[in-house]
Image (tube, coloured by chain):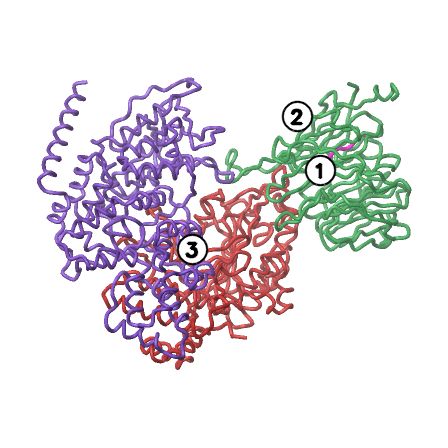
Amino acid sequence: MHTFRLMASCLVLTCWVAQGIADEVPLHKRIDQLVASESPDVQAASDADYLRRASLDLIGRIPTYDEAKDYLADDSADKRVRLIDRLLASPEHPRHMAEAFHVLLMERRGDNEHWQQYLRVSFAENTPWDKMAREMLAPNASDEERHGAAFFMTKRLEKVGQNPTDHPGLTRDISRLFLGMDLQCAQCHDHLFIDDYRQRDFQGLFTVYSSVQLKRGAKTPAVDVKPPAERLSFTSVFEATPHETGPRVPGRPEIPFEPTESAPKERPDPDPLLSALASDLTAREHRQFSRNIVNRMWHRLVGRGLVWPLDLHHSGNPATHPELLELLTDEFIAHDFNLRWLIREIALSHAYEQAREKRLSAEQTARSVIVALGTTESKALDERFAAMIEVFRKSLANEAQEPEDGFNSSVKGALFLLNDAEFLALFEKDNSPLVQRLVQQDDAAAVVDELYLSVFTRRPSDEERAELVTLLEDPNWDRAEVLKQVAWAMVTSVEFQSNH
Amino acid sequence: MRHPLCPSHEHRLSRRQLLTGMSAAGAGIGLLNFLQPAAAESLRERDKQVILIWTDGGLSQLESWDPKPNTRFGGPYRAIPTSVPGVHLSEMMPHTARQMHNLAILRSVCTQDNSHSAGVARILRGDPKNRGVDYPYLGSAVAKLMGPCSSGLPPYVWIKPYSGGFKSEHAGFLGPKYGALAFGDGQPPENTQPPDALNPQAAALRDELRRKFNERYAQRGRGANLDADSHVFDVAETLMNNMDLFDESKLDPKDQERYGRHDLGRHMLLGRRMLEAGVRFVNVTSYHWDSHGDHFNACASLVPQLDRPLAALLEDLAERSMLDDVLVIVMCEFGRTPRINSHCGRDHWPEAWSIAMGGCGIERGAVVGATNAEGTFVEETPHDIGHLFHTWFRALGIPPQHMEYVHNGQPLPVAHDECHAIDELLS
Amino acid sequence: MSTTEEMAPRVVTKPGTEIEHPGQLWLLRFNTTGKRLWASGYDGKLHRWRETESDWEAEPPLAGHNGWVQSFAIAGDRLVSADSWGRLVCWQDGDEPSVLWQHAEAHPGWIRAAAISPDAKIIATAGDEPTVRLWSLADGKPLGSLGPHADRVFSLAFHPDEKSLAVGDLLGTIRHWDFVQQTLVREFSVGDLAKLDRIQQCGGARVLAFDASGERLACGGQKTPGGGFATGLPCVMVLDWQSGEVIHELQHGTKDDGFIYDVAFHPDGFVMATSSAFPGKGHLWFWQPGEEKPFHIGKKLTNGHALALRPGRPQLAFLVDVARNGNGRQLINGEYPGGTAKIHLLELGTE
């Protein structure tokens, strides 16, 4: 009791201090103080690049022709801040976040309508990340709006063929995705090369997550828990000494736990054991939980993890900018795990202006292709996206269970871009308002300008313009054919296919 | 008909020629290659290649490479002499027996895993010491260590029953680029046919424009992903130019007869053609060899499906003077128990089994290692899969200085550090 | 039906004597007098036991075969045995058996079935060579061949009419041959007992047996057989010989109970069958064709590979294969254990 009060008061103090500093200097400015320009070669983004990057990162698509034109014409000094705020306020932002977190958390394992509803609602409300994590790790089946959160676990509890339920896999994913610690190799013994990863870390989580099962007969994602009857004993494959552990989050004390001989048939919802572990895992004082997500958001926006690989946080693999990681962690906790706030601050930093090239997800690619080819009105865009997304996913997304945290040029993707009939049909005049419009435009230079701004979100150089004008005016070519092929070449080029 | 060998330079050049005005730099490179076909050809001749035949589930060593007739666990079948005096194979392999002079057998294989799920990956990864990373499968390893052949075809293809696609999980820490391109039931992947509506001029135009946009992008100091992108587009294009490989109507009916019209026969014939076309590493997989019950009838049904096409392949490679450059490996995740269970079956046995190989760098007709009289355990020195990885990498002429990966800045040995090449298997 | 039938010995009432044998065995048969029990082994030998006053005494095995001796048949004092390397041997039964004649290469490979005609003049043999060969029992002279069949032959049964031979193959076809004229009479299908499962041709008409009258033919095997674990339901089909139709069929057990290794008609008309799979799987069962289930199941009598009624006594010899399954090393006292066999001499009685 005594300790608790002390801890609680410390906490209040920390919050107050953090809040106090944040009020004085916004986080993005403090980021800039910690990250000196990486090298003189790296230029801050041009307006066009910044617009494209921010649109892709915050609303999941490139800007429309009109959005680009307006932004480039805007001379005001605070246009970047206003852009970020406009994008974050757009209904496209929570939709993009839902898509991105679906890929991050489910890693292309599959989908579920209740899960999608949960993600949509959560990001629309900007639900704090700690709350989301608790909802996923201790799902409440009676909360109709948010019970889809259970899909994070239920999908992983599905049996594959004759294999037993992959409880070790579930445990691994929880530590990987929520704590940035891949404890896979610590399942059977202390990690051979990472001193921080101990077998008891894995087993402390496993004692709880191995007791989770799919709820029988449930029509929506839901889990049941058969609490363990005793503390979990385990031995290393290398030595015979037995150890035991109760429920425990890595780096935290064990959670008081009374082994139950016979569990009550109906356990409360959410399950008390899952809740206890989830609360400890997401606790403010458990900084690794916050460190993981700020590092992942930094990676998502800036193009590299402060800690890399994303799921190998340990003392032997320190952050490139340790102070920055701690600052982001402090501030994220102080701001109540507010993801939208964190994104805004990172997006306003110089580091973001110098972000590295990033991969486009299948969803970003599909939506951007449709926008580039002139379908910009939101309803039409959504419809076309819904009709096409599976085709894009099949060829451009990673295989199930493979994190999409790096570039993945694939022959499959190349063949798709080269030959897929449905993809190529998007460039037909009837399907592309852009091609349709430009066919009727006589002024070749104007055609080239509109093409560049629509597809590349920038104006062409004089050389680029001249080159395409020559081609467009070549009497041996059919103008519509040339336009189609130019648009295809732009869309399939690396400039379009990456977030630079 | 386009010759399956190396048409890509020619093809690319002809596309470029249509676009003389726009493609000076690109055409230059293409032209250079085109003007030196002899040099390209001699490069190709030195290409070492691999074909791995994988009998998934576990081929019985006793009914193939290491028969123990008239012993307690020997089963009903006989041993027969082979083209190498003194070497006997199971009577289930009469055709392969006549090609024994082109093969070598390691009869002292002793591996660590008796489960399929873990065993397959362990064997195909060479079961290196645990470094906390997933090691690549043999095909991905060779793709990484040796790269594609000069044909430009994907370095690692996997011919298998059922579905195909791009199997990045084989690549382990090397990354998806080194994964397998799987031809499900010998069929090409999706989207290898250019759309009908695309005429050659338009196709050449769009490809040239795309190249141009990428060049410009690179000139602006961008394009961290440019090389990888160009690579996959080149591979895709090479693949598209080799679609003849998949056209079974072009096959010699005599070959079809010799290899057999069952899946493994068809797939091994395709495998031979992939080697001829210049694929670095071909994995031909057959499933359902896991004969826990009614094993001897299973063998009578299954082993001939390996015997005939394997003999035909060895014969063809030798006849085409390719055998010196093609390493042929026949293996699976483990052997089968000497004991015959009460269901007339044999279970999983990693303790003492055999792996056969031949061709490139391998001593012809060698039989190395032995099991005891009843075939239960290895006599003298057992050899793990790590020894074979070392042996094969040596046979392929991978220089010792390349025998190391670098992952996240850390050097990682390409095979188990405590194993070594088996000299007796090397020529 | 009559009360005599109800009183007939038709169930196992006592486990009876057990004979243990250090190796695995394929087939079990009594000689004509019922005083000697013969079995063939995975070790290429013929094993035999003679009844003494208190027990069964093992006699020295007969060597000369190779591989597996999967099949043998007895008529009077003659015993013919066949092995998986193609050798066919005719023995003079007795305390010191002697070889009367033999063919080292009666077939080019595995002989899976050998049968003697009811008049004890002709031997039929068949196996991996898809041709049935006929021999004179007296001197071993080849008398001709029947076939070729479409695939491996698993089973042979002579009909009491002294001119018909039923031949069962891997593909689930039973052929009716006139072995006197050496002509094919007709073909029946027990196709459900065979299946091309993925890349493996599985199952087949594994065993055949006529009833005493020759009106019915029983065929044992496995329904919808599969590769790998060779799972499928143990199944006996009973065909009406006149029509060639399957008139009764019984699947007994689960798909883990293997396939029927042996089947026979009891003189009282019911079917005795045994299946085997992994240890503890597959039972001995008695079934009255026409009924929905076996009327007697020897639940503890698992892994039977052969059964033989003793002439003149209500006894059934039941051969059990004792061989563990499982992956990996599993040594016992440092030794790698092989399979063994156990023979139960079961007493049959009334319920």
Chain C takes which shade in the image? green
The region drawn magenta spans C305-310
**Separation of disc 1 and disc 2 at Cα?**
17 Å
Residue B63 in the image: state x and y as whole percent. Answer: 60, 51
Please give the label number shown on residue C261.
Answer: 1
> Label 3: how many residues lie within 10 Å, few (<14), some (14-19) or many (20+)?
many
> Label 1: how many residues lie within 10 Å, few (<14), some (14-19) or many (20+)?
many
- Specify the farthest residue to the left: A24
Q: Residue flagged by tag 2: what amino acid is it?
A: Lys
Q: Are the residues under badges 1 and 2 in a single subunit?
A: yes
Give the letter of the chain under mark 2: C
Q: For this view, does A151 lie left or right of residue C2? A: left
Q: Is residue B352 magenta?
A: no
Q: Is residue C188 above or below residue A275?
A: below
Per the picture, the main secondary structure of the magenta-coloured stretch is strand
Q: Which residue is mark 2?
A: C300
Q: Considering the numbered disc 3 on the image, is that residue within a helix, a strand or a loop?
A: helix
Res. C85 visible in picture: yes
**Which chain does the red colour mark?**
B
**Separation of disc 3 and disc 2 at Cα?**
57 Å
Chain A takes which shade in the image? purple
